Image: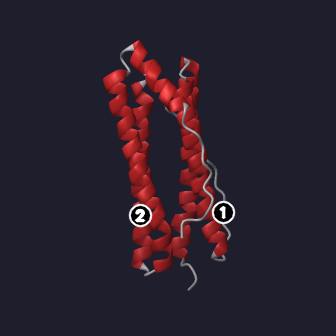
Amino acid sequence: MALTEQVTSVLNDQINKELYSSYLYLTFADYYEDRGLKGFANWYEIQAKEELDHALTIRRYLLDNDFTPTMEAIAKPDKTFSSDLEPLEAGLEHEEYVTSLIHHCYEVAHEVHDVRTMKFLDWFVSEQGEEETNARDMITNMKLFGCDPKGLYDLDREYQARTYVQQTALPM
């Protein structure tokens, strides 16, 4: 069964949203880098790479299903921050937004009975749950420990230890 126009449209749009997410997270990394918080910067650099992986995964899915994606312009992130907590809160807000986008893609696939795309999107649904949990945990940790220089240092060291693991297989 070929992908419908509705499904290809929302998935193609999702590629752009994932690329924007990557841009946005790089601006978070830049904020923390300027603050000397290299661990927090590392966390968001890895987030940016993961968002790029998500875009490429959706692109590959479309290509593998005989649809050539159309790359659109990526909006410039416009967030500015005045505290170390603000990027974390913006990160949670953005992850909740991305979750709503993934759910919309799933709903469109469900409406046209595209089981294959729904199965493909199952991985993204699970991934968004994990992303929201991580974002909430970072906010909690910052509120609990980030006001103290030693606590902030320890959090930064913890986030500096995070390593990037490239996605090796398509979620199918």
Q: Position of residue 2 (x, y in %)?
A: 58, 83
Residue at the top extreme, as displayed: 149
Q: Quadrant of residue 122?
A: bottom left
Q: Position of residue 152 (x, y in %)?
A: 43, 20
| Quadrant that contains the C terminus | bottom right
The residue carrying mark 1 is 70
Task: Please name the residue shown 43% across and 44% down the image.
Answer: 94
Kindly tell me whether residue 75 is visible in this rendering.
no
Task: Please name the residue shown 47% across and 60% down the image.
Answer: 124
Q: Amino acid at mark 2?
A: His
Residue at the bottom extreme, as displayed: 1
The residue carrying mark 2 is 104
Q: Position of residue 28 (x, y in %)?
A: 53, 32
Q: Amino acid at mark 1?
A: Thr
Closer to viewer: mark 2 or mark 1: 2
Kindly tell me whether residue 103 is visible in this rendering.
yes
Q: Position of residue 106 (x, y in %)?
A: 42, 68
Task: Please name the residue shown 47% across and 66% down the image.
Answer: 121
Quick one: label 2 or label 1, which is nearer the N terminus?
Answer: 1
SS type, badge 2: helix
Of 4 and 127, the residue lying toward us: 127
| Quadrant that contains the N terminus | bottom right
Task: Please name the residue shown 51% across and 72% down the image.
Answer: 7
Of 80 and 160, the residue lying toward us: 160
89, above or below 33, in the image = below
Q: Quadrant of residue 3?
A: bottom right
SS type, badge 1: loop
Q: CA distance from mark 2 to mark 1?
A: 19 Å
